[in-house]
Amino acid sequence: MENRSVREVEMLRPRLRPGLRFSLQETGGRRVCVIEDPVASRFHRAGLAEYRFFRELDGARTVASILARLARDGGGESFTEQEALQMIRWLKDNHLLAVESDRAAGDREHIEKAAQSAAAWLNPLIVKIPLARPDAFFARVEPSLRWALGGFGFILWLAVVLTGATQTAMDWPRFTKGFDGILARDNWVWLFLVWIALKSAHEFSHGLFCKHFGASVREIGAILVLFVPMGYVDATASIGLASKWRRIMVSFAGLYMEFFLAALAAIVWANTGPGLANTLAHDAVVTGTVVTLFFNANPLMRFDGYYILGDLFDLPNLSSRGRAWFQRSLAWLLAGGRELRPGPLRTGEEWVVALYGIASTVWQAVVLAGLLAGASVALHGGGALLAAVAAAAWVAIPVWRFFASLSGGRWPRVALRSALFLGGLALALFAPFHRSVSSPGVVELADTRTLRAECPGFVERVNVEDGQLVHKGQILLELRNDEASALLAKARLDAAQQELRARVAYTEGDISGFQAENAKAEALRKEAANHESFLATLTVRAPMDGRVTNRKLAQMQGSFVESGGEMLRIGRPEGNDVKIAVAQEDEPHLRAAAGRPLRVRIEGRGAVFNARLLRVEARATRELIDPALTALGGGPLAVRRAEEQRNEKPQTPEYELAEPRFGATARLETDKPLDIGELGRVKFRSPRAATLWGEMQSAFTRWMKRYTARES
């Protein structure tokens, strides 16, 4: 039967469709031919031998005569009849043969465009809107900008980029400080305008370089991703360029332009003070570098980074090949069958294709889930409806096509394996488990109390040493505050003068005047008493019998302590507690663990100690629970400057925790002496049941709260 098909094909006179364009390229050290189909905006690669065969298909000669001629010209080497049959089928499957009438071809083009348009509009979260055919525009603009597209333009680009990077690096702390306000609500409009300007320049650069290297620019338009506008330029004609470096430059052109504009903005930012120009410049630097690298340079999606990767390492059609390998592997896993089993991965390129297929599929699933979740949360009820429609277009239709491609005889096996897979997935997502909770902690004395300054002042005398045993009421520190002393003296003098006025009124028999003056004197006496009580706190006494701890106690002589500032700690001399900094998501689990044993592993010690939870603070705070737990003291907790709060309250500490934490205290159940300030980690298994799906929802909710908090 197969031989009969071959004989029939030999007598055919196939003809290539008119309008196809051919160009030669070098890929992976070998010459290939790129076939451009302008009707469908598609590109196909073929070897040089296949190219010679295709060019002979003129509709006048039979396949047999063409094969004979190729054999004669090639010294007896040519394709077999079976290979010729496969190539003709490939041409027909890709609509490259003129087997249809011109009207039919036009109808097919119309149907393809209508199908593409319908598929696009079925995705309300990603809408592609063609706007114009700009090839003539770029043909007029390119000659006047040609000077910037060569060596001189590159030198200028490099100088500006290096200058902008240097000035930003020299003032890096000020630059990073601006990150907190970039998503502020009053910056949305400016950020949106900067985004539009940079993306317009990005796409203009693609089209300009594409035209500069001789390729046509077919279309420009806009893409709305979750209703956020992004431009696009159809520069796919650059695939037909013979030089891979020119193809890479066309793909890199958008990043090239954005880096240049971001560098100019960095120079403006470095040389301006607070104001609109500085804000716009900062927005442009962040958008043109960090955001652009994350999206456009990401090779896992078909953006600039993907095409650069493919041309740089000679990996043509990496996305389609990787997706085909992944789909074939998935079909084999679900349906079985030797004919569906993907071949072994023998070469490095085959491994790259397989790994890329897995990575890109996972990444696209993550992006899809993020877009759907973002739409449902940000747009509320309407967003949930749009997310459902988009999910049907993105997930349901491709899944239906995938299962429809499997033969009917395999359906029982496919159904069973799919059910097992979905059941395993549901089990993983919704099966309850008891998660392990871990929080950092620091060793301190049992029942430790922190002594803070009530009245600020200079430390005039230190009467104890670190680790010294003290008794209740013993004087530990003596501070001096001349301003507070002067206020006390003035308050006493005002009170004495007012008492004198009251006595004078009493002596003169002015009863009503005496009562009024005496009331004023009483108020001044209370004010003086308050000043006296406040000043008395400059003498710091031990509130209990215990042991003093403060490693910097000896250096406190002559230092100034602000109101609320920590001076020292005192705790019971026997036993140890662990001060714990609990993350907000772990706080319910820790409260549920009251009365249950905790495990504490101290850094640098092989032993694990038991502990019992004593208390958990009622609310989370950004205050430093213990300096030893922060990055400033060598601990794991990140901190940030509290400058905004300090401007409102000068007595606020200079640093605060980057994320709010709950403070908790646990009593160590061991007689082994431990050093104060040793870091450790408290671990326990939560008594609260959790699910993976619930944990994912909680994580997303926390992220949204942080995001909206930054915006406000």
Image (cartoon, helix red, strand yellow):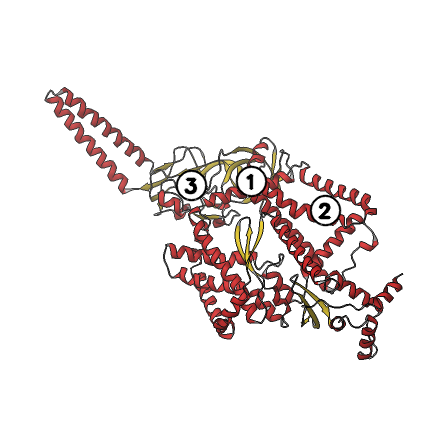
Label 2 or label 1, whichever comes before in sequence order: 1
Asked if residue 166 shows in the view, the reply is yes
- CA distance for labels 3 and 2: 69 Å
Label 3 element class: strand
Residue 397 locus on image (x, y percent): 69, 47
Label 1 element class: helix
Residue 126 locus on image (x, y percent): 58, 50
Q: Residues within 10 Å of mark 3 (few under 14, many from 20)?
A: some
Question: Label 1 sits on what residue type?
Answer: Gly
- Which quadrant would the C terminus be assigned to in this image? top left
Q: State whether residue 620 is above or below residue 222.
A: above
Q: State whether residue 252 is above or below residue 408.
A: below
Q: How crowded is mark 2: few (under 14 residues within 10 Å), some or many (20 or more)?
A: few
Q: Name the residue under label 3.
A: 568
Question: Label 2 sits on what residue type?
Answer: Trp
Q: Residues within 10 Å of mark 1 (few under 14, many from 20)?
A: few
Q: Nearer the viewer, mark 3 or mark 2?
A: 2
Q: Which of 438 and 10 is in front in this view?
A: 10
Q: Nearer the viewer, residue 12 or 83?
A: 12
Q: Mark 2 points at which residue?
A: 400
- Which quadrant would the N terminus be assigned to in this image? bottom right
Q: Which of marks 1 and 3 is in front?
A: 1
The residue under the point 22% across, 33% down is 492
Residue 550 locus on image (x, y percent): 44, 44
